Image (tube, rainbow, N blue to C red):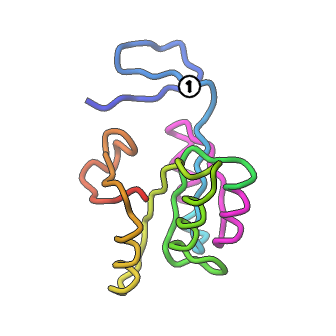
Amino acid sequence: MHRKIVPNSDVSDEHTEHVTGPHRVLVADADADTRTLYELALPIAGCEVVQAGDGRDALTQALTETPTLIITELRLPLIGGIELCEIIRRDAATHSVPILVVTSETRPTELIAYGELARTPCSSSRHCPTLSSTKCRIC
């Protein structure tokens, strides 16, 4: 059974976790349409979405105000997705923030580099219940 998160609600049952405010999700993708999809979908789940169109902007935003979750594409301008993940993991303030990589990347060398960076299989029930049939990794 999936646990639902209900921001600022009076609803209560054994499968509900109350939070004091929205989860802050940083979405890093060069494609504006993709960022817009997240901007439309995630607030329905009680998430505040912060967008970044390149890796440098994503890094600046993550270090300025630590997000609850980072969703990134591997192919980012200025600072690539793999390098972004590596920097985030080295920083004391952001090292424990889950990073969900969603990519259209197909080059084996890039995917191998990402595979070496990924450290934890995605627990769909914990990190993203709507992705229960999707294979992913959290780095």
Residue at left offset 57%, top offset 77%: 80
Dot 1 crowding, Cα within 10 Å, few <14, some 14–19, many 20+: few
Q: Residue at x 57, y 44 (%)?
A: 68
Q: Nearer the viewer, residue 126 or 13?
A: 126
Q: Residue drawn 60% across and 54% down?
A: 26
Please report the residue visible at 40 percent of the width from the left and 72 percent of the height from the top.
Answer: 114
Q: Nearer the viewer, residue 7 or 125?
A: 125
- In the rendered picture of this protein, how many numbered marks are placed on residues? 1
Front position in the image: 9 or 25: 25
Q: Position of residue 77 (x, y in %)?
A: 63, 80
Q: Is 135 part of what is drawn in magenta?
A: no
- Occupied quadrant, residue 116: bottom left
- Image location (x, y in percent) of residue 52: 66, 64
Instruction: Please report the bounds of the magenta region as a residue range.
Output: 36-61
Specify whether 73 is left or right of 30. Answer: left
What x and y, as percent, mark residue 96? 52, 47
Q: Disc 1 designates what residue?
A: 19
Q: Is residue 64 above or below residue 68?
A: below
In the picture, which quadrant includes the C terminus?
bottom left
User: Which image quadrant for residue 16?
Assistant: top left
- In the image: residue 105, left or right of residue 96: left
Q: Position of residue 98 (x, y in %)?
A: 48, 50
Tell me the chief SS of the magenta region: helix
Q: Amino acid at mark 1?
A: Val
